Amino acid sequence: MALTKDGISPRSRLIAGMAKVLEQRALSELYADDVVREAGVSKRTFYQHFPNKEACFLALYRENSARVLGVLKEASGAVGLSALERIQLGSQAYLSFMQGQSALMKRLYIDILYLGTEGMKAKREVLQQFADVLLAAYDAERAQMPALPPLDPELVLATVAGINELILFKIEDGQADRLRDLEGVSQKLLLGQLLLSQSSQG
């Protein structure tokens, strides 16, 4: 893949350009030309990588979600942590990272809802990936403490989806810069999932 003079691929420049434009306006209000201008590439280059602005948005959505996921993995995956510590550190890091890019997160969370089937597919993929990270972190602890009961994957997914909706409510209320306010309730939801699993095994 050809790189631009700064060593960044045109596709990466376009995704970064989409992110910058989205900080200022909604997906419905922007054009491919806006992204091209911000990215510093030609319109022809845009259409070599994406059929339309929606496809570029989805690429950004998945890429940014992967970065958030990496933050969650790093915070909750350290060796020797208890389940409670993983929940606390993971939720803090996760919400802090998103709050740090609140303008972009607002657009990603809201605009994905208007992309129909493709948007819902991308959202489901991301929610499942986050649930898988939480399950993997818990299973790492179970490997050291076999007496711990397993978690129900569907309940974990439901919990992640619930937290996602709380974040969306916060963003829709104009409080994208206050996502860390949700740390307490997020931790309680995840901890409740652990306690529910333990009581069902009792």
Image: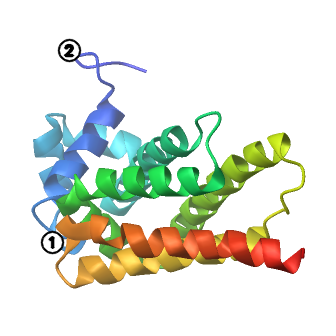
Q: Is residue 117 visible?
A: no
In the image, what residue occupies the spot 13% across and 53% down?
Answer: 34
Instruction: Verify CB contact (< 8 Å) between mark 1 and mark 2.
Output: no
Neighbourhood count class around disc 2 (C-alpha, 10 Å): few under 14, some 14–19, many 20 upward: few
- Dot 1 crowding, Cα within 10 Å, few <14, some 14–19, many 20+: few
**Rendered location of residue 120, percent (x, y):** 52, 74
Which of the marked residues, 1 or 2, is nearer the chain's N terminus? 2
Amino acid type at image mark 1: Glu
Determine the residue positioned at 21% across, 85% down: 173
The quadrant in which the C terminus is found is: bottom right
Q: Which residue appears at 83% of the width and 46% of the height?
A: 145
Question: Which residue type does callout 2 highlight?
Answer: Lys
Q: Quadrant of residue 46?
A: top left
Q: Position of residue 135 (x, y in %)?
A: 71, 56
Q: How is the image coloured?
A: rainbow
Coordinates of residue 137 in the picture (x, y in percent): 67, 48
In the rendered image of this protein, does residue 50 appear above or below residue 91? above
User: Which residue carries the number 1 mark?
Assistant: 29
Q: Which mark is residue 5?
A: 2
